Image: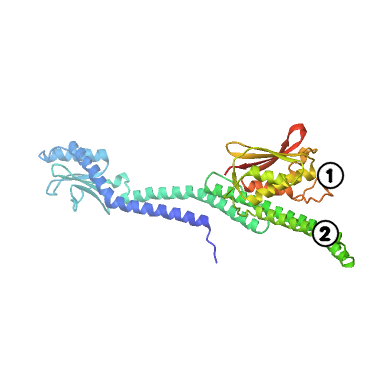
Amino acid sequence: MVRRRLYLQIYATIIGSIVMMAVLSGILWNVFGRDHFNREVLGLTSELAMLSLPQASAPIAEQHQAIIKLGQKLDVDISLFDADLQLVAAFGRPLDPPRGFGRFGGENRRAGPRLTLNLPDGRWLAMNVSRRGAPHPLIGLIMFLGTIVVSVVLASYPLVRRLTRRLERLQQGVVQIGSGELSTRVKVEGRDEVAGLAQSFNEAAGKIEQLVNANRMLLANASHELRTPLARIRLGIELLEKNEDPERRKALMRDIAELDLLIDEILLMSRLEAGAQMDRAESIDLLGLVAEECARFDHCSVAGNAPEIRGDPHLLRRLVRNLLKNAVEHGASPVEVEIEADADSVKMAVSDAGDGIAPENREKVFEPFYRGAGSQNTKSYGLGLALVRQIAEAHGGSVVISDGANKRSVILVTVPHA
């Protein structure tokens, strides 16, 4: 199958439209405009010619002298006829009497184009304008319209080619993305719809690359982290078969619960990264929710006041629980939570008495499976704060780490009212 190039189709459409417009313009001018124009122009010409000639009652010799003078001045063959189309005077080659005209008109004969005027007093004036090199009116019209067509053809080609060349680059970008080159981007040129399409393509390609890379990292880290609890479970089952030990059974149940929690967090991260829809229609008392979660930990307090917000209660509870658990496991008691609101959002600040997070690690702690140098042997898998950021962003909010009082780190979560 022969593929039709887009720029050729657009170019052919433009040329065809211009040619059709030129042909229709010529037809309409020939049918309607030319006769009206001729009547107006030639009517004025006959009036001017009448002023250059003596009266019809003047002697023939006087009329003849006037015709000779007029013919020499205009350098044309000219003949004067009376109202009965009888030749009165002529300069140059005598012309045939006019026929088939109203007051005035023009015709083309073998001898050349002629102009015929019916003077106001009834006489006829015929002129052969071939000496002056006057072209046929139709030839002039064709040359005029042809010039327009050629100009449009030459001017439209680079514009059409520039437009379609950008579309071709977009097509190449889509093909490269489909072949696995996720870093492919296209050049954004101009400010029109094609430029907007290129910008949208780059944004979509960036999100695809980010999502695929995140999934690759998640799978790689998950496969590594799952080996530890699975190995412990396997060893526990082998020892349990040899010796029934209640304590070992409890440890085995803890390992299973730990594995279940890890799988649950991995699945939740995958759902949030894939943009899964949340139930955000429920009104939530964030202060009450935080107070309930604080009751699960020792030396945890909450203060402040805020209006209800809308969101997914299960995800927001997971966000608060992960923040408090992170503060307890990686910080020091007491843990303090302060909630306040402004016109647009609700802010929740979580701090503890620990050493805080170094500035160079404040973005890394939100990466999945990241654990600092001093927490390699803890039971944490590094998913808590990553989930906190994803849940906040899923609600249209954000999470940042800043310096609080006494150089302690403060995790600030901002969630809009609606």
The x and y percentages for residue 43 are 21, 42
The kind of residue tagged 2 is Lys
Query: How many numbered circles does the render carry?
Result: 2
Image point (26%, 45%), residue name: 37
Instruction: Please say whether residue 231 is visible from this viewpoint.
Output: no
The x and y percentages for residue 291 are 68, 43
Q: Is residue 30 left or right of residue 410?
A: left
Instruction: Please say whether residue 46 is visible from this viewpoint.
Output: yes
Residue ranking furthest to the left: 57
Residue toward you, 242 or 416: 242
Q: Secondary structure at mark 1?
A: helix
The kind of residue tagged 1 is Gly
Image point (64%, 46%), residue name: 393
Image point (26%, 40%), residue name: 74
Q: Mark 2 vs mark 1: give the one in front.
A: 2
The x and y percentages for residue 413 are 67, 41
Residue 402 quadrant: top right
Question: Which label sits on residue 250?
Answer: 2
Q: Is residue 157 left or right of residue 323?
A: left
Image point (44%, 48%), residue name: 152
Residue ranking furthest to the top: 406
Residue toward you, 206 or 172: 206
Are the residues at dot 2 and dot 1 in contact (C-beta closer than 8 Å)? Answer: no
Between discs 2 and 1, the one toward the N terminus: 2
Q: Which quadrant: the C terminus?
A: top right
The x and y percentages for residue 154 are 48, 49
Q: Secondary structure at mark 2?
A: helix
Mark 2 residue crowding within 10 angstroms, few (<14) / some (14–19) / many (20+): few
Q: CA distance from mark 2 to mark 1?
A: 28 Å
Residue picked out by circle 1: 374
Q: Is residue 393 left or right of residue 125?
A: right
Q: Residue 108, relative to residue 75: is it above or below?
A: below
